[in-house]
Amino acid sequence: MLYKTIARGRYDTAMPAWSVEDGGPLNQAQIESVIALIQHGDWATTRLVVADLGFAPRVPASVVVPLETLKQRQTTMAAVAHVPSSRQSGRIFCRDSTSY
Ligand code: HEM
């Protein structure tokens, strides 16, 4: 699935095809290397290296989400449960979380 997505890209999105077969720059071995990096890379260390290079802050990203939006969406972010209902917006800090 990862291979197919990277090799062919995602139709009708900004995600391009990367395989040589589909006009991209990567051969099969290179795509497999990228997949190995995604699945087995040391991302905790990568985060620090990126921060030390000055490309990203060490603090996790945060966004302000209107409470109405949170109510309308099913979300797995536990932080949502802690937003007081009297507030108009909740400041959500998330790290490695998924929302649907
Ligand atoms: C070698 C570099 C890249 C790799 C390995 C890669 C890998 C992936 C993978 C695995 C997904 C699927 C994520 C998922 O379904 O959860 C994805 C989605 C996506 N990628 Fe890439 N990507 C790369 C470069 C790019 C670039 C350069 C762009 C834009 C200029 C891009 C735009 C997108 C977009 C918009 C999606 C979401 C498509 C959708 O809505 O289904 N990607 N990418």
Image (cartoon, rainbow, N blue to C red):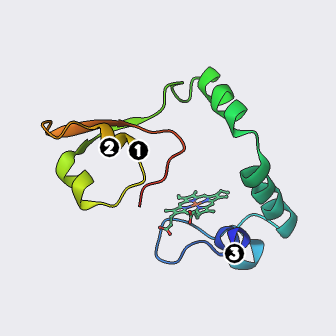
Residue 85: x %, y % from top left? 17, 41
The mark that comes first in sequence, 1 or 3, is 3
Kind of element beneath mark 3: helix
According to the picture, the residue beneath numbered tag 1 turns out to be 78
> Does the closest atom of ligand 1 sit within 8 Å of the Cβ of label 2?
no
Real-space Cα separation, disc 2 to disc 1, in angstroms: 6 Å
Mark in front: 1 vs 3: 1
Q: Amino acid at mark 2?
A: Ala
Q: Residues within 10 Å of mark 3 (few under 14, many from 20)?
A: few
Q: Amino acid at mark 1?
A: Ala
Whether the residues at callouts 2 and 3 have beta carbons within 8 Å, the answer is no
Residue 14: x %, y % from top left? 49, 65
> Does the closest atom of ligand 1 sit within 8 Å of the Cβ of label 1?
no
Q: Could you say which disc has been placed on residue 81 in the image?
A: 2
According to the picture, the residue beneath numbered tag 3 turns out to be 4
Q: Quadrant of residue 93?
A: top left
